[in-house]
Amino acid sequence: MDHASNDDVIFDPTSIARCRELLGDEGKRLSDHDVDRVCRHADAMANVIVELFLQQHETQEQPE
């Protein structure tokens, strides 16, 4: 049985349109698949940044 990878599943078309809008002129030149990949990458990077911030905040709150 074949399973779809995350790259094979495209976000909701509304999300694609919103991401394309946020990308501005660059988004107009990209395919839906490329916009979807940019959205996924941005989402992953945002999660990493939040995790790093929370870890840093936790470290700063610990008493010495």
Image (tube, rainbow, N blue to C red):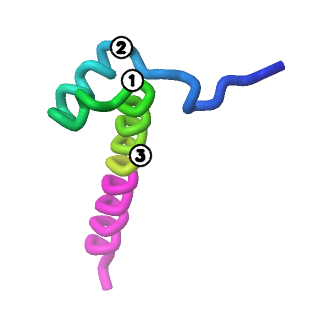
What's the residue type where badge 2 is placed?
Answer: Pro
Q: What separation in Å lies between label 2 and label 1 (alpha carbons)?
A: 8 Å
**Which residue range is magenta in the image?**
48-64
Answer left or right for 2 relative to 8: right
Q: What separation in Å lies between label 3 and label 2 (alpha carbons)?
A: 19 Å
- Identify the residue at horizontal 47%, vertical 22% (top origin): 10
Q: Quadrant of residue 53?
A: bottom left
Instruction: Name the chief secondary structure element in magenta.
Output: helix
Q: Considering the numbered disc 3 on the image, is that residue within a helix, a strand or a loop? A: helix
Specify the label residue 32 is tagged with. Answer: 1
- Identify the residue at horizontal 36%, vertical 13% (top origin): 13
Q: Quadrant of residue 55?
A: bottom left
Residue situated furthest bottom in the rendering: 64
Q: Which residue is mark 3?
A: 44
Q: Which marked residue is nearer to the observer: mark 3 or mark 1?
A: 1
Question: Nearer the N terminus, badge 3 or badge 1?
Answer: 1
Question: Nearer the N terminus, badge 2 or badge 1?
Answer: 2
Q: Position of residue 1 (x, y in %)?
A: 83, 19
Q: Nearer the viewer, residue 25 or 13?
A: 25
Given contact means CB atoms under 8 Å apart, are the residues at marks 2 and 1 in contact?
yes
Q: Dot 1: within a 10 Å radius of its alpha carbon, few (fewer than 14), some, or many (20 or more) residues?
A: some
Q: Considering the numbered disc 2 on the image, is that residue within a helix, a strand or a loop? A: helix
- Identify the residue at horizontal 66%, vertical 24% (top origin): 4
- Relative to 16, is 45 above or below? below
Q: Which residue is mark 2?
A: 13
What's the residue type where badge 1 is placed?
Answer: Asp
- Relative to 11, is 62 above or below? below
Q: Position of residue 16 (x, y in %)?
A: 32, 22
Q: Quadrant of residue 63?
A: bottom left
Question: Nearer the N terminus, badge 3 or badge 2?
Answer: 2
Residue situated furthest top in the rendering: 13
What's the residue type where badge 3 is placed?
Answer: Ala
